[in-house]
Image (cartoon, grey):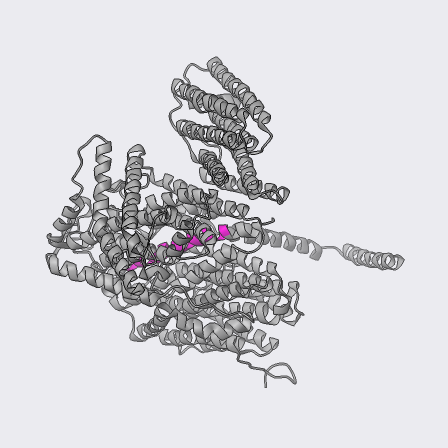
Amino acid sequence: MITFLSLLATLLHAALMFALAPLLFGLVGKLRARLLGRRGPPVVQPYRTLYRLLRKTTLVPETATEFYPVWPFLCFVPLGAAALLVPGFSSGMLSANSSDFITLIGLFALSRAATLLAGLETGFAFGGAAAAREVLFSVLAEAAFLVVLLSFVLIAHSPTIDGIALAFRGGHIGISVSLGFALAALLAVALTETGRIPVDNPAGHLELSMVHEALLLEYSGRYLLLFEYAAMLRLLLWMSLIGTVFFPFGMAHAVDILSWPGGLALWFLKLGVLVSALALFEISTAKMRVFRVPEFLGVAVLLGVLAGIFLFVASRIGA
Amino acid sequence: MNLIYPLTHLMGGIMLVCAFSLLSQRRLSAMITLYQIEALTLSAAAFWQGFAQHDTQLYLTGLITLVIKAILLPIGLRQIVLRFNLIRAVETALPIGLSMILGVFLIGVAVLVVLPTTLNAISLTREDLAISLSIVLLGFLVMTTRRNALAHVIGFLSTENGLVLAATGMPGMPFVAELSVALLVLLAFLVVGVFLLRIREHFDTLDLAGIEEIERRGR
Amino acid sequence: MFGLPGQGIHLHVDALSALFLCILAPQIMASALGGMFRSLTFWFFVLGMVLAVLAGDAFTLILGFELMSAASWLLVLRGDEKPAPLYAGIAMISAACLIPAVFLPASSLAFLLIFLGAGAKAGLAPLHIWLPRAHPAPPAGVSALMSGGMVKVALYILIRYAFVVFGAAAQPWWGALLIAAGAASVLLGALRAMLEVEMKTLLACSTVEHVGLITIGLGIALRAKAMNDPALAALALQGALLCAVAHGLFKPMLFLGAGAVKSATGTTSLDWLGGLIRGMPRLGALMLVAASGMAALPLGPGFAPEFLLLHAVIAAAATGGILARIGFTALLAGLGLSAALAVGAALRLIGIGFLGRPRSLHAAAAEDAKHATLLGMALLAVLCVPVSLFPSLILGFLVPVIQQLSPHSDPMPLAYAPLTLALLFLLVGGVAFALLHRLGVRGTREVVAWSGGFGRPPVWLPFGDPATQPSATGFADPVRRAIGLGLLARGGVDPAEAYVFAPLYRLHLRLTRLAEHIRRATIRQRLAFVFAALVVFLLVLGLRQGS
């Protein structure tokens, strides 16, 4: 019975993750437009875009190699797997034990690697330039991500996302300075990984300044659909991750079906808050120059280190 | 009682993040905004400590901080930025990345200094003292890594914030806090005044090159 | 017959040497298949390695080690004469450190000598600068064995002495020393692997990185063992040994592949390659497998060791004083940085070398490698499968080794479950594929690449203008500007070269000049030297008796 309930929770979670990802994207776009005083596209626009891509013929450049169709799948599949690992509305899902944080970092890296190879695939200038930049960003983002992870694991005594969420929900941790630093660092990493505004402009149209979009210039039709959908899923994943780790209040237990509605409502609320925060942040800052981004991420790495240092200060250790 | 420690911590943490971010900023207006947030947090911390320690003098400290540091000084600084057209990025003496790594190193030093001396104190004071000392050192670092006099002023003000934070956190030290506030106001206006005067003396076109020219003459 | 008079050669197999023999065996087979089986020097090289690993006494160990060094020097000399003197010099330094060390009693001095000797041979920073020069020089089979095997033999000696022979005298700072050297190697190796243009040099730099990773694991284990923390020691040893196993599989593959590229196109410079996967599809697929190991991506052979090592560093950050903890935090940041750099380097190798358009006619006309080479690589690739998908199985085989190195430790099961992950991948991928196939418009149409609207290249440029394609140098440029300028010395030189070797070289010059002065002294001056020496000697004697 208990296993059945966690299976049910996992399935519900997976269905919601995969179904809601485009909606979240649409919400951010709509809210951003509204805040700028424009009417903006309808909230369901991403669904329409995906459907349109599905019905289009897929064009393959002459210079593409045999691996051209592999990369879209290799980009999407790790994120799809990660979507099953990151808890959303409930903890204690079937995948709870394998949701190790380092595995998650690896899955993100795999997806990113596939996207970069897609950019290098046809051998045209924009894809290559964007890939070079993306490598630089990923180097610092990964360092920041790992250092932040150190504080989580040492506070929660558990390396899995599920365990960290459980420990943080316990409440005996309180508000710690370390976690504040960690949140700031993780937000910077999230903005970089999802290609949002201070690092990259998702709505940009100038090839020279694009990073994530320029990698996909040579893709069309259903392959482009996979990349686009992966980007939407990535945003939802990061929001769920931040919500789960930093605001674990009111998460449901998979084995307790009565707690599900409350958990679901709170999950939607958290996502709503994060979406509004993202939209607000995006309209209030401008995109950085490429070589300012390493500084931005360098701050994130150092904040992560500081989170660790203050963690050690708080626990009573001698020099 | 439960909330006192975490909230104090949180405010100290926000102030430290502000002080640290000061290092990474190139534009004066962004530095002023960060300083303003820092001062606001400081006044909130002072109010909170006043509430927690039932001490009216701390309320006074908070009020002074709020009015002077979080409202009046930033307005004044912004006026200067506007009037002398310092909107563009200012040059730093050290590369940003290096100065940030130095900043983390200084925080480490602060932690190492505070740790052995406070091994017997409760962990709250340890963290708070470490944060205050870090903010002070970071302020000095800002002063040494910038070529711009206004940035020096901001670094100095940030240092002062760190001192006041330490004073509010310690029970039984409220007078120091007010004293330092008064001292701060005096010094800051002195520095800004001198800065204004010297610029007015030397130049008609008031831009970055002018400030650096002053520096060169000063050396 | 051989060996010390009256003693002979003692061979001895225990769990540790068996493990390293297992690491060596597939590489030797692959390298022999890769075209080296006719070379007598190669077999002497192999004999030296096997002898060093199987040695039951110090003399045999040194004999094997020196045989390995001498044979590999000959092989390097045959490939390229330039790095050979440097290689010989480093080999002599490591011999000069190892030979006294193995006959010393267990002490910190002996450990330091072993660390210097074995570290120099393994390519630990700051004595790593010979490695990116010497490893690419010989033919591919030898490069493969040098990178995958020879550094492992050096690490074997380090493990053998630090954990087993000197085990009782171990101090925590021995581990800290290993961690520091390892961290420097990881950072420098990963960064240089990202920046180098020659494929084989790039791979050699990546070897420096992996040696650093293994050493970090060993260092954490040694420190934990000295501090009586067997659980952490076991975790770190799991990571280090699994990393040695995985690196011994994918790195020889990459070197053999680079050799095949060289024989097909005449160059290994990434700036002249591109699009190789069209002409060499089988080699390209094998290289893709190996590169996933080098990049430590999930479901590749390199991820499980990286996973274990990162967990070991995190666990180690919860032990010791605050300085050590801050150090481990910084180490974790460095490891994250270099892990992503390693991904970048592997992407660059595949993306610039094998994908995209050809950058020269040679690259366009490349044909697939010889069957024997492909067979050797395929052998290693097949062995990669259990390391990638069933790392728990391999870790089960490692248990006796870990218990030999760190008694009383009981290794934990691995928390990373690649099989579950693979099933999830299949599930998600299958559903996505089925949905796209079912609902989407099927089939594809071949068109001219969009390329920002530039359109079709002229007829006389069949692959477009190669200059419009990002080069390997250009691809690495953002990293070089943002990180390389900070970590490398002026002019992009390795800091070990600029700050360790250049001053040493200057010191050497100065000493030579001094010696030259002495050599040119007149008879009277020489008499004065002897006289002065006599006076000093008498003085010392008198003072000692006086006190």
Q: Nearer the viewer, residue C417 or C262?
A: C417
Pick the front one: C188 or A51: A51
Residue at left 60%, top 41%? B114
Instruction: State the image quarter where residue C294 is shown.
Output: bottom left
Q: Residue at x 30, y 50 (%)?
A: A263
Q: Relative to B141, is A62 on the left or the right? A: left
Q: Quadrant of the N terminus of chain C?
A: bottom right
Question: Does the magenta segment cover residue C351?
Answer: yes
Which sits in the foreground, A232 or A85? A85
Residue C132 visible: no
The range drawn in magenta is C329-356
Q: Residue furthest right?
A: C546
Q: Is residue A188 magenta?
A: no
* Helix, strand or loop: magenta stretch: helix
Residue C310 in the image, given as x and y percentages of width and height: 45, 58
The picture places residue C52, in percent across and down from the top left corner, at 53, 75
Total labels drawn: 0
Residue A31 can be seen, yes or no: yes
Q: Position of residue C337 (x, y in %)?
A: 42, 51
Q: Quadrant of residue C60?
A: bottom right
Vertical arrangement, residue B178 with respect to residue C525, above or below: above
The image shows residue B179, relative to residue A226, as above or below, that is above
| Side of C16 where C166 appears, left or right | right
Identify the residue shown where x is 39% and y is 17%. B83
Task: Between residue C170 and residue C124, name the one nearer to us.
Answer: C170
Quadrant assignment for the C terminus of chain C? bottom right
